[in-house]
Amino acid sequence: MWMGARANTVFLNKLKNIKGFRPVTKHKSAELWQAARVTLVQMTPNEDLDADEQAESFDEELVYQLEQSAKWLKQQAPTLFSQLRKSGHEMDVFISYIIDRDQFELSLSSQFIAACARLNLPLLFMTND
C-alpha cells in the first residue's frame, strides 16, 4: 500500500483488530515514496518435518491464516480505503512466495477473495523465479 507519511499513520491507526487475530506487523513508511505495509500472514516451512509432512503442515496453516485474514479484512471500513484512493494512494494485497522448485500451488478461498474485493484490493503475486 503506497501512502504518504501522515496518511499512512492515520490509516494504520484506523485499522481494526478482531478478537483472536492481529496482523503480524504494521509498518508505516519512513519516506513519502515508501509503502506502508500490513503483514497479515508470514510463514516459513517447518524444517523438522520430512518434505511431504512439511508441505501438508504448511498448506494447512496457510489455509487457516488466510481464513483469519479474510475475517480481519471483513472488519475494515471500505470508506477508509476509498478515501485514501481518492487522495491518490494505491493499495493492493501483495503475495510473495519464495519457491525452491519449478512450481507452487496456492489456493485462495472465495471468502478471502471476496474480502479483498469488498475493499477493492487487487491481488498481486510475486515469486523469486
Image (cartoon, rainbow, N blue to C red):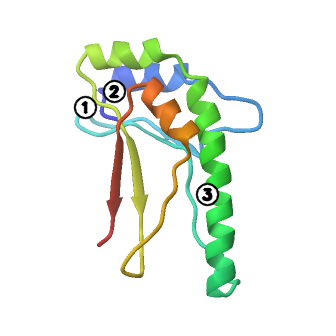
Local crowd at mark 3 within 10 Å, few (<14), some, or many (≥20)?
some
Query: How many other residues sit within 10 Å of disc 1, few (<14), some (14-19) or many (≥20)?
Result: some
Q: Would you name the residue on which mark 3 appears? A: 62
The disc, 2 or 3, on the residue closer to the chain's N-terminal end is: 2
Residue drawn at the location 27% of the way across and 36% of the way down: 31
Q: Which mark is residue 5?
A: 2
Label disc, if present, on residue 20 of the rendered structure:
none
Q: Which mark is residue 32?
A: 1
Badge 2 density bin: few <14, some 14–19, many ≥20, Cα 10 Å: some
Give the mark nearer the N terminus: 1 vs 2: 2
| Amino acid type at image mark 3 | Leu
Up the image or down, 50 lies above or below 120; here it is below
Q: Nearer the viewer, mark 3 or mark 1?
A: 3
Query: Residue pushed farthest bottom?
Result: 50
Give the residue at x 38% y 36%.
36
Furthest residue toward right: 20
Q: What secondary structure is marked by label 2?
A: helix
Q: Residue 25 in the image: x percent, y percent?
A: 55, 44
Report, in whole angstroms, how far the alpha carbon at label 2 lies from the one at label 3: 31 Å
